[in-house]
Image (spheres, rainbow, N blue to C red):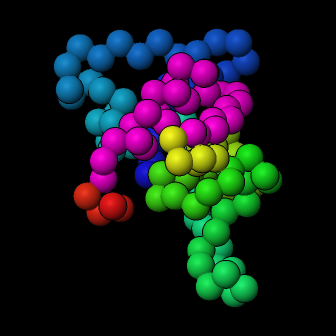
Amino acid sequence: MQILVPKVEGDKAEAWKPIGKANGIGESYKEGKKERISSFVNKSPKWNEALQAFVLNFNGRVLRPSVKNFQLVDPEVESNVVVQFGRIDSNLFNMDVKYPFSIIQAFALCLTSLDFKFACE
């Protein structure tokens, strides 16, 4: 998963007002116009020999394995988790978020991970 958001610097966020699809944040990123865009990716899980599975360390904030669990990081600083989302019970999830994401942005992102995914189910 790759997430693109308008860049936030200090207490100012870039205003992104596309006129059409060609002016959107995705198109600008593809064209190499990345100076006003922040990019984040899924943190890659590591192989755990004892469990014989790929795992992510959620530091006790996630209790159940799920294809919906994820940690979002800056691709250049993988240790800086900005959004993490994971299952804690059959129908309960936990979301943690920090700068530069807002609560609304993170919540919308996490909602999309709850949608049915053919490749994951």
Drawn side of residue 1 relative to residue 71, left or right:
left
Q: Position of residue 109 (x, y in %)?
A: 47, 34
Task: Tally the marks.
Answer: 0
Q: Is residue 50 above or below residue 32?
A: below
Quadrant of the rendering where the C terminus is positioned? bottom left
Q: Quadrant of residue 16?
A: top left
Q: Residue at x 57, y 39 (%)?
A: 92
Front-most of residues 92 and 38:
92
Please tell me which residue lies in front, 86 or 100: 86
User: Is 57 drawn above or below residue 21 in the view shown?
Assistant: below
- Residue 109 magenta-highlighted: yes
Residue lying furthest right:
59
In the picture provided, is 73 more to the left or to the right than 117?
Answer: right
Quadrant in which residue 10 is drawn: top right
**Furthest residue toward front:** 90
Question: x%, y% of residue 57?
Answer: 73, 60
Q: Residue 61 or 33: which is nearer the viewer?
A: 61
Does the magenta portion include 115? yes
Which residue is at the front of the view, 63 or 90?
A: 90
- Name the residue: 39% across, 37% down: 112
Residue 98 shows in the view: yes
The residue under the point 47% across, 12% down is 15
Q: What residue is shown at x 36% (from left), y 30% (from top)?
A: 25
In the rendered structure, the answer to whether residue 28 lies left or right of residue 36 reads left
Res 80 visible: no
Quadrant in the rendering for residue 55:
bottom right
Magenta extent: 92-117
